[in-house]
Amino acid sequence: MQQPPIYNGMPSSDLGTEGWHKPWSGGNGGNCVEAMKLADGRVAVRQSADPDGPALIYTLGEISAFILGAKAGEADFLLS
């Protein structure tokens, strides 16, 4: 049986319930970002408060650029 295509904005529930991780969480009552590494190497991201909501799908290069940029301070403007 062939798997349905994985696409940006698809319902997170279509990706299953296993494999989601909360790589970071703040003091916001447990609402945070969850991520899942997909079999093809891409990364799915969802809002934990809406586990059936849309998943954003990133390539490994895209998620790497985001994480490295955040570590380098390129997203600090979001905190001000």
Image (cartoon, helix red, strand yellow):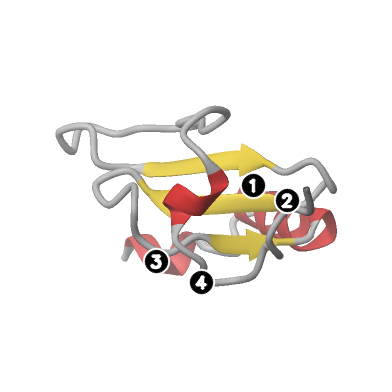
Q: Which mark is residue 68?
A: 2
Q: CA distance from mark 4 to mark 1?
A: 26 Å
Q: CA distance from mark 1 to mark 2?
A: 5 Å
Disc 3: which residue: 78
Label 4 vs label 1, nearer the camera = 4
Disc 1: which residue: 71
Q: Is residue 15 above or below residue 20?
A: below
- Closest to the observer, 68 or 52: 52
Drawn side of residue 62 relative to residue 35, left or right: right
Label 3 vs label 4, nearer the camera = 4
Q: Is residue 32 above or below residue 29?
A: below
Q: CA distance from mark 2 to mark 3?
A: 16 Å
Drawn side of residue 20 relative to residue 26, left or right: right
Write the residue at 80% across / 41% down: 39
- Closest to the observer, 45 or 79: 45
Disc 4: which residue: 9
Residue 59 placement (x, y as % from top left): 78, 60
Going by the numbered disc 2, the residue's amino acid type is Leu
Q: Which mark is residue 26?
A: none
Q: CA distance from mark 2 to mark 4?
A: 24 Å
Residue 9 placement (x, y as % from top left): 51, 71
Q: Quadrant of the C terminus?
A: bottom left
- Residue 36 figure quarter: top right
